[in-house]
Image (tube, helix red, strand yellow):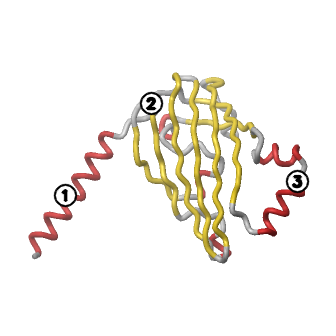
Amino acid sequence: MKKSLVLVGCLVICAAVLFAVTEQPLNVKPGLWQVERTITYSGLPPQYQAMLDRLTPEQKAAMGIDAPHPFKTCRTEKQLNTSWVQGDNNCKWTVLKSTGSDLEVHGTACREGKNEGRTSSVDVTIHVLDPEHLRGNIHGTETGNGINATLDGTYTAKWIGATCSADGK
């Protein structure tokens, strides 16, 4: 029994090491990127939906809801295989697939709704079009306390240059 547990433990460690070795960074340039994201929500509770409905088209666009929301992000070599989503440090990220042209990550333990007894998760896929352009999709869920909401979105990114400003943008 003890040998079986040791063997299983070794296999798990070997698999983790093998996966880490095969993980490849996206074949894109590090530096400053212009990202444009659009998201839509569904399944929101009536009070949240009412708040969204009261927003003007300009306010929604500023938040990237039902309209493109542009933002800049600085990506170092180490950050190329992260989610590329604003606020991505709010989740625990796991790389599911990593090649030079495609990245799939899954975020759990996200902060959104945690204080209200809800759990949320998000899946992000990124596809490299060329070293200066990529596109992605995002799908997230939030459940608990009577909420069963989803968000879906798309984004595109274009490399601007190799140098980022002091504030990382």
Q: Which residue is mark 3?
A: 55
Residue 75 located left or right of residue 49: left
- Residue 54 at x, y percent in the picture: 89, 57
Quadrant for the N terminus, please: bottom left
Q: Of the residues under marks 1 and 3, which one precedes in the sequence?
A: 1
In the picture provided, is 16 more to the left or to the right than 64?
Answer: left
Q: Quadrant of residue 151?
A: bottom right
Give 53 or 18, whichever is nearer the viewer: 53
SS at mark 3 in the image: loop
Three-letter amino acid code of the residue under disc 2: Ser
Name above or below for residue 112 compared with residue 38.
below
Q: Earlier in the sequence, mark 2 or mark 3?
A: 3
**Counting other residues with Cα less than 10 Å from the Cα at mark 3, is it few (<14), some (14-19), or many (20 or more)?**
few
Which class describes the residues within 10 Å of circle 1: few (<14), some (14-19), or many (20+)?
few
Q: Quadrant of the C terminus?
A: top right
Q: Amino acid at mark 1?
A: Leu
Q: Amino acid at mark 3?
A: Leu
Task: Give the numbered dot on residue 56.
Answer: none
What residue is rendered at 82% in x and 44% in y?
62
User: How far apart are the two marked residues, 1 and 2, measured between alpha carbons?
Assistant: 29 Å
Q: Which mark's residue is nearer the viewer, 2 or 3?
A: 3
Vertical position of residue 159 compared to residue 145: above or below? above
Judge left or right: residue 55 versus residue 146: right
Q: Which residue is mark 2?
A: 101
Q: Nearer the viewer, mark 1 or mark 2?
A: 2
Q: Which residue is mark 1?
A: 11
In the image, what residue occupies the spot 61% across and 45% down? 85
